[in-house]
Image: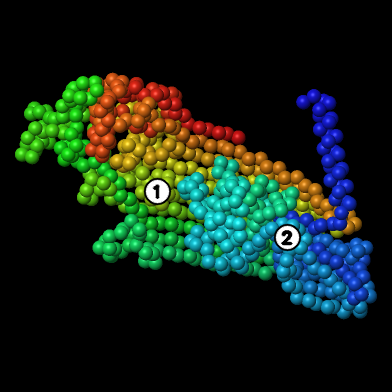
Amino acid sequence: MPTSNLKRVAVALCSLASVAVALALAFPATAEAQVLYGSIVGNVKDPSGAAVPRATVTVTNKGTNLTREAVTDESGGYSLTDLQTGAYTLRISQPGFKTFEQTDVVVSLNTVNRVDITLQVGEVSETVTITGEAAILQTETSEVHADLVATELENLPVPLGRNYQQIFKTLPGFSPPVNSHSIPTNPARSLEFNVNGTSDNQNNTRVDGVSTYNVLLPHVVSYIPTLESLQEVNIVTNSFDAEQGLAGGAAINLQSKSGTNQMHGSLFEYHSDNHLKAWPDQIDDPELNTGNKPKLVYNQFGGTVGGAIKKDKLFYFVSYEGTFDHRAVERRVTVPSAAMKKGDFSGSDTPIYDPLTGNADGTGRTQLSVSPGDPNYSLCNTATNPQCLNILPAARLDSIALKLAALIPDPNLPGTRNNYYVAAPFAFNRHQVDTKINYNATPKLNLIGTFGVLHYRTSVPTVFGDELVGRPIGGSSNPGHGHGETYRFTVMGNYTFTPNVVFDAHFGWARQGTASEQPGLGKNIGSEVLGIPGTNGPRAFESGWPEFEFNGADDYATLGVDNNFMPYYRHDPQYQYVANLSWIKGKHNLRFGTDLYHMGINEAQAEFLFGAYPREVSTLNEDLHCAARREPLEEDATRLPMTPERTALRHLCWGCPRLQAGPFRSPMNITSVFGCSAPTLVIAGISLQN
């Protein structure tokens, strides 16, 4: 940018800053809330209603004996900012008046509490004590907000999982929060919701002042503190102040509990099992609803403890929560019969024609059959099928397709649809620790440090096990194993230069680490076992199974890996730097600050596409033509509707099946694999690094 432009920008910024300060000084003071702290403001008067200047105002935290002082101005007003949340005792003294004392003045997160006082004439040694009551209305700020305190969080009925976000459904403007994404992608089991009609990615949640923004998926947060560790949740849904950044729907501020001079703690256990549940919806036959229901054991337990390491100086708080979700999951899928896997489709009433016969327009073709001397002639029951129709000759079966067919289990239920039932154990184990240290270093300097860690592991079984993989049976949408750790760390503090000038700052760091790995990794099954070139690469995440779909998985169960985004390894860091200065000048309360975010995406993830025909395959004859001749497809006037039998035959003959195989190391053309014309397929692993 030219120097002249830089000068113009600098002048403009200075002018805007000057105007802002002038406007602030021109109007009466309005108290400002703080994301990490709260404030107490008010006016002190005598019995006649006149202001009482230069009165000494003292507040003392009842849990830690932390004390702050202020002096009323000429109009009798006082303001105490950057107060840690909790219950305080407010004391006001002035010669010629009785000392005023009000207990249980509650300071809440991001809230201004107004306490106006009328002093009574008398001796300072006399004390008037009043028990504090919560203000009915918030009159000091224009924010629209709600507060959830510890007693509500701990005692309101919350579903298993004990996520504070479940309570949002009781707040105006919130859509009912719902689960989102697989466990490895969202191990905190954060919920997704909309506020006042805004997008679900317009909410910002801070834990002890530090954003828990999920860089990759901003509609969920990366860290959910344990419910027992939370002191307060403050939810702002309108009229955000300058400190509520990155929020268009809701600015949500969480504060963890602190230790006090009194040791306190808790223990909890929440349990559910199959004996407390109804029969699963999938078992809709009343005759099957007998005996034991599918196994389900859910345990969530833990405890908290907090107290003083050194009275009035150093305090600690620790919370642990363990979550163990173990259950039997089940699924029904469709698999071909044993006869179909050998090439015998004589059980179908639909004729299967040989594409190597007849005319190019599809007329004049003969029905496929097997003759004596062919190895597949033994499949023919001449008593019911004297011409051995709809049985494929052994020479027409592809060797790779036969390898796959040999791995597919036979049906274990009657019928041709949903004829294979499988059940297996699912497990999700999570350990979470949240800690906090408070240090009253001096009467002017207070420091706080927090640390949290979430460790999880999950095991999701697949329809065909480790040998052939297939779809996840249930529990989570990612097959195989997930594991990882998410960390958060905050250090914060405030320093009182004078009763009218207070500085606060904090630094936060968080990193969401998670991995999801499907069965079969470490072995190049596509290229080495099945013999399909280009389906695996040299790197570890390029190993494993390709995916084989049958008419979009509508006809028969998917074989191999079931998705196009695994495995993945994510380590997404973020840093936050915040500094604020509160300055009370006469009747004016000014607050300046800066809030800097540094977010990164550091991931390795396989993303691959589909290799298929350049147009939708819709005729059996085209499939057989491709399989038998290994030639490019030709237009065919005969368009037979696809049936399960035709689809099974198409894939058994390896008629250019719809293949999702990867990740690949370099571009390839499916023609080189199958001998059938197809578009170029480009597959690559994605690695984004900050």
Residue 200: where, in percent of width, then height? 57, 48
In the picture of the structure, the residue carrying the numbered disc 1 is 460
Q: Is residue 26 left or right of residue 280?
A: right
**Which residue: 75% across, 73% down?**
132
Residue 395: where, in percent of width, then height? 18, 26
In the picture of the structure, the residue carrying the numbered disc 2 is 111
Mark 2: secondary structure: loop
Q: Nearer the viewer, residue 89 or 333?
A: 333
Question: Does 70 appear above or below 387?
Answer: below
**Which residue: 82% across, 25% down?**
3
Quarter holding the N terminus?
A: top right
Does the CB distance between marks 2 and 1 fall below 8 Å?
Answer: no
Question: Does 518 appear above or below 226?
Answer: above
Residue 230 bears which disc, if any? none
The CA distance from mark 2 to mark 1 is: 45 Å
Q: Nearer the viewer, residue 145 or 245?
A: 145
Q: Please state which amino acid type lies under the numbered disc 2.
A: Thr
Q: Is residue 689 visible?
A: yes
Q: Please state which amino acid type lies under the numbered disc 1.
A: Val
